[in-house]
Amino acid sequence: MSEPFRQMLRALPDFPERLPDFDPDSAPADPAELFRLWLDEALAAGVPQPNACSLATADGQGRPSSRMLILKDIDADGWHFATSRESRKGQELAANPHAALNFFWQQQGRQVRVAGDVVELSAEASAADWQARPGADGSENENTDWQLYAIRPREIEFWQARHDRRHIRHRYAPR
Ligand SMILES: Cc1cc2nc3c(=O)[nH]c(=O)nc-3n(C[C@H](O)[C@H](O)[C@H](O)COP(=O)(O)O)c2cc1C
């Protein structure tokens, strides 16, 4: 692209002046607990849709793709998300059941990365998720392709930006 475009990209502001502190030494042992804490702090800081994240998948040849979606829950099965089994990501997960999530909360200079194996949750749980979507009118679930999945984390990394560039990375390897 043109030189002015390059310069414009480089001159864009990054993180706000005030960034939260993060001390990995006092972080909870359970990454889900830390995520809940950070999510509450993101909400308090006015981050819009902090439950939105990118989901990266790859096809059978290892060619990656990513898109945004909504985190639905975290429990013993893993980190839940839902989509159509017929979608590109649904087909990629059928061929290659591994994925990565990435949350980015700009106002706080925070990123949370999750990667692991993906399992399909039950048809009942998938139907309940379909019904619970905003705007659902309570009618029968006509979308039989709708599937609730869980990523069972192999690794989770909490990242906190710092203005001195000594960014903090706190990693969990649950399995
Ligand atoms: C903030 C945001 C949240 C989204 N949430 C979901 C979601 O929870 N499930 C879903 O299937 N698509 C969701 N989408 C749409 C996906 O990003 C994507 O366009 C769609 O699922 C098709 O993706 P695919 O062709 O790669 O399978 C969301 C998009 C945005 C921008």
Image: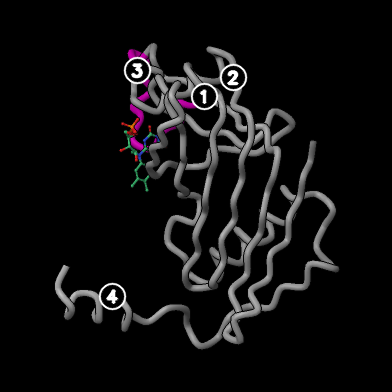
Few, some or many residues within 10 Å of mark 4 (<14, 14–19, 20+): few
- The answer to whether mark 1 and mark 4 are in CB contact below 8 A is no
- The answer to whether mark 3 and mark 1 are in CB contact below 8 A is no
The residue beneath circle 2 is 121
Few, some or many residues within 10 Å of mark 3 (<14, 14–19, 20+): few
* Residues drawn in magenta: 128-143
The residue beneath circle 4 is 9
In the rendered image, residue 117, in percent from the top left (x then y), is placed at 63, 28
In the rendered image, residue 157, in percent from the top left (x then y), is placed at 67, 54
The amino acid on which the numbered mark 4 sits, given as a three-letter code, is Leu
Cα–Cα gap, marks 3 and 4? 37 Å
Ranked by sequence position, the earlier of labels 4 and 2 is 4
Q: Is residue 152 left or right of residue 126?
A: right
Q: Using the rendered image of the protein, determine whether residue 131 is visible from the camera's viewpoint.
A: no
Disc nearest the viewer among 4 and 2: 4
The residue under the point 74% across, 31% down is: 76
Q: Is mark 2 within 8 Å of ligand 1?
A: no
Q: In the picture, residue 36 is in which quadrant? A: bottom right
The residue beneath circle 1 is 148
* Label 4 SS: helix
Q: Using the rendered image of the protein, determine whether residue 93 is visible from the camera's viewpoint.
A: yes
The residue beneath circle 3 is 86
Ranked by sequence position, the earlier of labels 3 and 1 is 3
* Label 1 SS: strand
Ranked by sequence position, the earlier of labels 1 and 4 is 4
Work out whether 94 lies above or below 135. Answer: above
Cα–Cα gap, marks 4 and 2? 42 Å
- The answer to whether mark 1 and mark 2 are in CB contact below 8 A is yes
Frontmost residue, 74 versus 130: 74
The residue under the point 33% across, 27% down is: 137
